[in-house]
Image: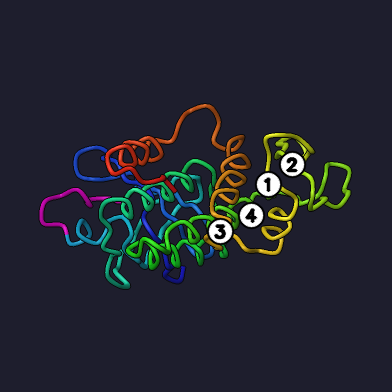
Amino acid sequence: MQPQPAFLLHKRPYRETSALVELLTLDHGRVRAVAQGVQRPGSRSRGRMQPFAPLHVTWVGDGELKRLRLMESRGSAALLVGEGLLCGLYANELLTRTLPVELPVAEVFAFYGALLEALPRPDGRAGSLRRLEVALLESLDAAPRFTEPDGRELDPHCHYRFDNASRAFVPGEPGIDGRTLRLLAGGDWADPGLGGPAKAITRAALAPLLGARPLRSRELMRQLAQRRRVVPH
């Protein structure tokens, strides 16, 4: 196979010197694989197989668990610290938890790469996370429908709550006004003035996909917010 652009989402030790890895790849989506020898001291692959570092990889195997053959760097890792690092860990955990194995998600891959470029800048984090979340929801056929459940247009003077069963919006208080929802329907997910409603909607839409088990990265973000008195993304 041709080398695939990829990013490491998760890694854990496997046997003595190997690792089980979850990768986000351009053409094959999430790939699970064994990286043999990557934990061995002195292994060149050990330094390459790091989160937020762009890779080229190949693998073999017909089952769900592959075996990596090639692991090459295709650039420097994003230098993330503090809140930026936690946002990156959130994105990795979110994709690992929700993406089915080997579902092609080229748009998710593109928005993930854009997110890594944005995370070092505080003003770019929230909007880039929302774009990634929306791309993920769309790839899973779980994106919000900006109508009422019966398809009626949203009233800009009415307030609405997101309904997971229909993935649409039902009138109700407290809620988000129809005018704001119309702006989000037009793709204004990165508008700073719409940050709160955008986060509320993507979080509600993602909840059924994530299930009851909480995200570890989200808890770490809350802890950081308490220490720094910032609002978690």
Residue type, label 3: Gly
- Contact, mark 4 vs mark 2 (Cβ under 8 Å): no
Question: Going 22% across and 60% down the picture, which residue do you hit?
Answer: 45
- In what element is the residue under mark 4? helix
Mark 2, residue position: 160
Disc nearest the viewer among 1 and 2 = 2
Q: Secondary structure at mark 2?
A: strand
Q: Amino acid at mark 4?
A: Ser
* In this rendering, position of residue 77 left or right of residue 31: left
Give how far across and how far down residue 98 sits, in percent.
54, 43
Mark in the foreground, 1 or 3: 3
Q: Residues within 10 Å of mark 3 (few under 14, many from 20)?
A: few
The residue furthest left is 42
Relative height, residue 48 to residue 181 (above, below): below
Q: Nearer the viewer, residue 133 or 123?
A: 123
User: Can you identify the residue that label 1 sits on?
Assistant: 142
**Splitting the image into 4 quarters, where does residue 182 fall?**
bottom right
Distance from Cα at disc 3 to Cα at disc 2? 18 Å
Disc number placed over residue 193 in the picture, else none: 3
What span is in magenta? 35-43
Report helix, strand or loop for mark 1: loop
Instruction: In the rendered structure, find residue 139 and report the number of the disc placed on it.
Output: 4
Give the foreground label among 4 and 1: 1
Q: What amino acid is at disc 2?
A: Tyr
